[in-house]
């Protein structure tokens, strides 16, 4: 949301971490919002009762009362309250519990300010629409056209069905998912789900008969193009006499939430993997120390022309290779545990130049030519200079190695409305399609040597910079790795107590 377009809305931020609280307040104030601060759960409830904010951010762990309990109390005060849950726990269960308790969305620490501003603008807008719709419901059919206009601006799909469960109306988002109204009108609403054993209309009617006015459930939905997505369906009865028996359905696409859930699960897996690997690496190092020491001692006791000398040399060489791999693993484990990025304004051209110097200074890749194309007068980005240099160094080294030291690399920088894009194109052997999804996983490698940790570190660094990576490759023709880096300033914080 542009600063000039932001409305004077009131936002409550409840977080006992005062540094995070102040950063969030400062950012939202820059965008024209009025911000109220609270530092524990009970203080948050008191502030909500007094100010009735348009949007509330609740941290999970707070003194006096945790975020879940505070959320439940706020929803008792105002069921339409817009609440975003903040968790640094890295636990899918906490996020799901918050959503079930009534949270409208959630964000995880470290908080990206880009995401913070985006979700604030989105939910403030949706809250305004929701409040307007509630007011308009009491005015009857005279405001039908106005309500239709409002629904077309919503980010959720809206469908109305008659008392037989047949589709009568679809807003713009619903038509984007399922096609033109002319084609869908008077079709059973169950055509929007892929599971023939489910009967959405029957489930909604059953809930209404049990006194549930606002039915909610998650379903797998099928779009017009055949793709499947997870969505939250909310159903409410139309109160107008003219539409007696009719039902309005709102479907919220949960794709982004599902992605965040997967990221949380992946982070937990990496944490567990790091603990296991750390223990295994320690045990292997102990054995290698003994094996290396005795093999070197044995080497001194055999003559240079002895047959046994060949075997001993092989043992020593393999010990060195394994020691190098263990060092890589221990460095990776330490990196994931103790590294803390230090963000400041820096130039992408400086980062690329340093990474290229680091790549080619050893003389290992003298057969590789490279070309760099960067637009003039590029804006600076907020980044950790050294970590980004390391990330691109790993990418350049992998590109050179994929060409077996002979070929060319082309590096192109371009701008997206929200991202600075760096393309790394190589003329190497390419990556099979079935392997692309695994290349950023720890310990995945197609090389004879190495532990396969370089690209995993790249993925973590780029993600910490509010970005992401895509890969396109053709076997025998080369690979393009595209790095997206957030253009606007964002903040990565460490959860309190970690």
Image (cartoon, rainbow, N blue to C red):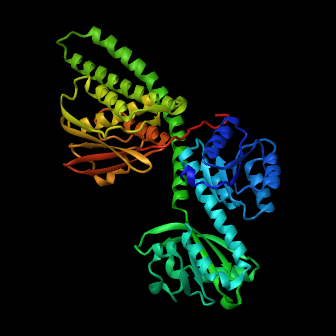
Looking at the image, the residue that sits furthest to the front is 4
Q: In this rendered view, identify the residue nearer to me: 417 or 181.
A: 417
Position of residue 442 relative to residue 76, above or below, is above
Image position of 461 (left or right of 63): left
Which residue shows up at 73% across the image and 83% down it? 209
Q: Position of residue 438 (x, y in %)?
A: 38, 48
Position of residue 242 relative to residue 474, above or below, is below
Quadrant assignment, res 204: bottom right
Q: Position of residue 496 (x, y in %)?
A: 67, 36
Q: Position of residue 35 (x, y in %)?
A: 70, 47
Q: In this rendered view, identify the residue nearer to me: 239 or 397.
A: 239
Q: In this rendered view, identify the residue nearer to me: 247 or 398.
A: 247
Which residue shows up at 32% across the image and 26% down it? 321
Is residue 195 visible in the rendered image? The answer is no
Locate the C terminus by quadrant.
top right
Which residue shows up at 23% across the image and 39% down it? 409
Image position of 95 (left or right of 72): left
Quadrant assignment, res 49: bottom right
Q: Position of residue 421 (x, y in %)?
A: 37, 45
Image position of 18 (left or right of 165): right
């Amino acid at each position: 949301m542009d600063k000039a377009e932001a409305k004077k809305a009131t936002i409550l931020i409840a977080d006992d971490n005062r540094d995070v609280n102040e950063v969030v307040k400062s950012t939202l104030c820059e965008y024209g919002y009025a911000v109220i601060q609270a530092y524990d759960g009970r203080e948050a409830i008191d502030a909500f009762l007094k100010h009735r904010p348009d949007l509330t951010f609740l941290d999970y762990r707070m003194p006096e009362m945790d975020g879940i309990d505070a959320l439940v109390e706020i929803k008792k005060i105002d069921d339409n309250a817009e609440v975003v849950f903040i968790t640094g726990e890295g636990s899918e269960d906490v996020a799901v519990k918050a959503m079930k308790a009534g949270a409208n969305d959630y964000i995880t620490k470290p908080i990206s300010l880009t995401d913070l501003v985006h979700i604030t603008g989105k939910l403030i807008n949706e809250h305004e629409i929701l409040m307007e719709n509630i007011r308009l419901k009491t005015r009857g059919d005279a405001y039908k056209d106005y309500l239709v206009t409002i629904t077309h601006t919503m980010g959720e799909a809206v469908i109305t069905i008659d008392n037989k469960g047949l589709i009568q109306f679809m807003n713009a988002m619903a038509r984007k998912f399922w096609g033109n109204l002319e084609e869908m009108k008077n079709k059973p609403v169950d055509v929007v789900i892929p599971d023939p054993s489910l009967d959405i209309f029957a489930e909604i009617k059953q809930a209404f008969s049990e006194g549930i006015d606002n039915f909610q459930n998650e379903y797998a939905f099928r779009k017009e193009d055949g793709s499947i997505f997870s969505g939250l369906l909310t159903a409410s009865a139309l109160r107008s006499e003219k539409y007696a028996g009719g039902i309005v359905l709102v479907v919220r696409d949960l794709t982004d939430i599902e992605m965040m859930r997967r990221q949380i699960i992946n982070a937990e897996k990496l944490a567990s993997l790091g603990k296991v690997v750390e223990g295994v690496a320690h045990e292997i190092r102990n054995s290698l120390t003994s094996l290396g020491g005795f093999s070197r001692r044995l080497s001194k006791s055999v003559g240079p022309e002895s047959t046994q000398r060949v075997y001993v040399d092989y043992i020593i060489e393999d010990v060195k290779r394994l020691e190098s791999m263990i060092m890589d693993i221990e460095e990776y484990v330490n990196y994931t545990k103790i590294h803390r990025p230090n963000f400041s304004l820096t130039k992408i051209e400086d980062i690329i130049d340093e990474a290229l110097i680091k790549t080619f200074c050893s003389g290992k890749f003298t057969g590789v030519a490279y070309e760099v194309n960067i637009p003039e007068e590029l804006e600076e980005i907020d980044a950790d200079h050294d970590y980004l240099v390391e990330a691109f160094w790993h990418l350049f080294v992998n590109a050179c190695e994929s060409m077996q030291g002979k070929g060319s690399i082309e590096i192109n920088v371009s701008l997206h409305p929200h991202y600075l894009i760096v393309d790394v194109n190589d003329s190497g052997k390419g990556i099979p399609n079935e392997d692309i999804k695994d290349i950023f996983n720890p310990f995945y490698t197609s090389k004879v040597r190495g532990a396969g940790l370089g690209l995993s570190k790249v993925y973590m660094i780029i993600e910490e910079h509010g970005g992401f990576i895509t890969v396109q490759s053709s076997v025998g023709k080369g690979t393009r790795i595209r790095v997206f880096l957030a253009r606007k300033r964002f903040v990565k914080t460490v959860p309190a107590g970690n």
